[in-house]
Image: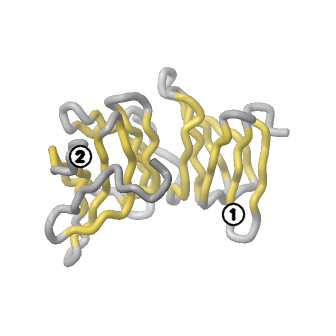
Amino acid sequence: THDGDVFYNASAISGYYPRKMCMNDGSLIAEEKDKTSSGKILVTYYESGISEQQKAIAQDVVAFCEMDNTNVFVFGNTAGKGVLQLFYSLNNNLWNPYFYPLATGPILSAVKIDSDTYLIGHSNGTIYKYKYTSSSLTTYVTGYVATQLKYDELNNRIYIVEANKISSIDYPSLT
């Protein structure tokens, strides 16, 4: 509920702290960072809050976007370069569905439009549109250094947050 009652409770793996999280079909998926090193893990927790599985990762997660009940897109950066991966929670597998290099520089944000379409805010001032089924990455709009992207599916509106400005545009028309 949203009236202050606790409806999910989990503890981070000992020696780690959570940075990014998402729910996926009742399970909690979290990026956790080692308190004393640069190590990071992707942890899946059962609905009971007990750790189910974990996987070492190299990237700093920027955003999780749930694709379906067993797959979550993980957008992030490794050594200052954007990384787009898909996490299959049933077998703890993380793989690259897009085999081509991304633009130079880090990803700043990402948002799900539908289970096949995702927008990626990049540090180069471009918002890219990624289509999973065609494995295509195209320029959606330029001129926005989007530190956050939010999608209002009821009104088909995208909110773009920059350092000192919030813009909104209709999707997909860009008006």
Q: For the residue labelled by badge 1, is the local secondary structure a helix, a strand or a loop?
A: loop
* Residue positioned 67% across, 59% down in the render: 145
- The amino acid type of the residue labelled 1 equals Glu
Q: Which mark is residue 44?
A: 2
State left or right for residue 67 relative to residue 143: left
Q: Which mark is residue 142?
A: none
Q: Quadrant of the C terminus?
A: top right
Displayed quadrant of residue 158: top right
Disc 1/disc 2 C-alpha distance (Å): 31 Å
State left or right for residue 123 relative to residue 34: right
Q: Residue 152: x, y in percent?
A: 67, 41
Residue sitting farthest toward the bottom: 36
* Residue positioned 60% across, 61% down in the render: 147
**Nearer to us in this view, 41 or 81:** 41
What residue does disc 1 label?
A: 162
Displayed quadrant of residue 129: top right
Q: Residue 53: x, y in percent?
A: 15, 45
The answer to whether 110 is drawn above or below residue 13 in the figure is above
Q: Residue 113: x, y in percent?
A: 59, 34
* Residue positioned 22% across, 62% down in the render: 12
The total number of labels drawn is 2
Displayed quadrant of residue 166: bottom right
- The amino acid type of the residue labelled 2 equals Thr
State left or right for residue 45 relative to residue 14: right
**Other-residue count near label 2 (Cα within 10 Å), few / some / many at <14 / 14–19 / ≥20:** many
**Other-residue count near label 1 (Cα within 10 Å), few / some / many at <14 / 14–19 / ≥20:** some
Q: Nearer the viewer, mark 1 or mark 2?
A: 2
